[in-house]
Image (spheres, helix red, strand yellow):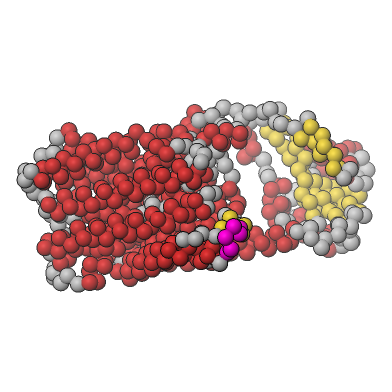
Amino acid sequence: MDIDEYNGTAVMRRTVGERPRRSWRSWLIGRPLPTADAPHQTIGKLIGLAVFSSDAMSSVAYATQEILIILAVAGTAAFSYSIPLAVAIVVLLAIVIFSYEQTIHAYPSGGGSYIVARDNLGELPAQIAAAALLTDYILTVAVSVSSGVAQVVSAYPALFPWRVWVSVALVFFVMLVNLRGVRESGITFAIPTYFFLVMMYMTVGWGVIRWLTGSLGTVVNPPEMEIVQTLQAVTPFLILKAFASGTSALTGVEAISNGIPAFKEPKSRNAGITLIWMASILGSLLLLITILAHQIQALPSESETIISQLARTVFEERGILYLLTIAATMVILVMAANTAFADFPRLSAIAATDGFLPRQFTYRGSRLVYSRGIVALAFIASALIIIFRASVTRLIPLYAIGVFVSFTLSQAGMAHRWWKSGHLKPGEEKVERGSTLRYDPAWKYKMVINGFGASVTAVIALVFGATKFSDGAWIVVFLIPLQVFIFSSIHHHYRSVADRLSLEHFGAYPRISRHRVILLVGGVHRGSLAALRYARTLSDDITAVYVSIDPNEAAKLQKKWEIWGEGVRLVILDSPYRLFLEPLLEYIEEIDEQRQANEIITVVVPQFVPKHWWAKFLHARTADTLRKVLLNRTEIVITEVPYEVH
């Protein structure tokens, strides 16, 4: 034990040697880790790509399909627009990646859009960014898992009626793996991620070779496309709507900037390289899948995905390579949920530290992860899957609005950061809450790029909100302001409590001049005498109180108290209507009204502690009931005196 003295105050510090006991949780999620192990739980670039990029990479499984679904209202001839739209999406991806690469180096502590908005745009934009991102992560789990199950249903249609419960089971499986820790979950999911990349590049690579050699052909027995009652003309608005739907491919690109602390040193450099890898994979796969889908004349359908049509066309029907491709796609889509499970708890912890979410989200579990955030995410996402019947098309309208709101705020915040940087002198530094601001000679160039990116993503968010509003996007449009209101309310509560607890301008409490004790007795026995012994250590002013329901029992108690009560006065409250709590509370309130200044009242309650856990249900929890009722009385203390009954 180390003992330090400072200003005459002895401070003793000791390291607790006790370790958590092994339980069923240890078997399920692993042995508890000490805080000192936190630096060893970080991950490298290859594992980081699996943990934080699976969401972005998996979006190629449905982004092309979402473009074609919108274009379908103008007929199959409009599908030719999918290729230039994919090119435009890749250009937008490059702009967004540029912004987040700058964010990674500027804000190495993580937090992404939330931190950028907080430090550069203010508290309200930060709350909007947090609401948008948390909504995005919840929907990431729901959409990715539902899409993964859709891939399996494409191969095995008999599973269609069970798709909802299969999806929920997968959500809780991913939750369980993440509760084991970031490093362990990353290692667990790394092999499936690279298996997906190998199979996807094999599929599109062989497809390109067959296309160039003229042997690719078209989809055999294509699925039925939903019949459009009235074909529409190809309009700029339709193209913009299809572009907005296709930009769902960008979901998840902010994940790395949120999870920088999970990387090994140098954190920012490793996170930045991983971000570039992820963008290159995402952009190339999106372009190749869209081009090949157009060449094989794939049709958007709920019954069979574009990836399934592409794989069985490239590999010529449903052979082993087709099944491996579908399995890899299903796995990466389920793993996309892992990205949300990695980032949702971290962002929740940051927001909770700032006082916008309950403080409980800042606590690390036994495996050094924010377990409360992980569990909350699993339950909320499962509820969405059940409500929307695991339909990707029904969930997508809810999905991308939050993504592009966070993109817009992040890039607008970075643009403002470059503006602030340009107004510093060379060599001058300004320490802000989340980073250190320095002069950047290229600030104008960077500000223009981020400003342009913010404008584009803002337009996409508005298009999503307008075009998908009646399809379900109204839910997100309503939820984000509701979350901001909740954040503000929680923040106001914490600030109010902090002000009330502050020691600033506070002298000291006056000493307690008198202590009055009320001892509740339900009978005269060893437990009540143990409570009486404790009450005597507090004060000589003790009143024993008994609520009488049966006069005969009251008479017996009075006789026994005269023998064993050690002269302490006894008050018997006659209750002709056999009420117990109400007469007791009335008496306590009467004593409280007569309480003098600097006087405190302690209600002492004998409490039986039975040997067996089930026996506690056989005894009244009087102290608990009184504590709930008298909680707002600042000068009344409820004390339990336990007495173990063997």
* Vertical comparison of 418 with 195: above or below: below
Question: What residue sits 22% from the left and 63% below the top?
Answer: 70
**Residue 19 makes an appearance in the image:** yes
Left/right of residue 583 with respect to residue 442 in the rendered view: right
Q: At which x and y percent is residue 226?
A: 16, 59
Q: Quadrant of the N terminus?
A: top right
Question: What residue sits 43% from the left and 54% below the top?
Answer: 100
* Magenta span main SS: loop
Residue in front for this viewpoint, 172 or 427 = 427
Residue in front for this viewpoint, 194 or 225 = 194
Instruction: Please state the total of marks drawn on the protein image.
Output: 0
Q: At which x and y percent is residue 272?
A: 43, 47
- Residue 228 placement: quadrant: bottom left
Left/right of residue 193 with respect to residue 493 in the rendered view: left
Residue in front for this viewpoint, 10 or 527 = 10
**Residue 479 makes an appearance in the image:** no
Q: Quadrant of the C terminus?
A: top right
Question: What residue sits 39% from the left and 61% below the top?
Answer: 404
* Vertical comparison of 38 with 121: above or below: above
- Residue 610 placement: quadrant: top right
Question: What residue sits 93% from the left and 46% below the top?
Answer: 540
Q: At which x and y percent is residue 519?
A: 82, 47
Q: Is residue 344 magenta?
A: no
Left/right of residue 215 with respect to residue 452 in the rendered view: left
Q: At which x and y percent is residue 237?
A: 24, 71
* Vertical comparison of 498 with 5: above or below: below
Left/right of residue 377 with respect to residue 349 in the rendered view: left
Residue in front for this viewpoint, 430 or 190 = 430
Segment colored magenta = 424-429
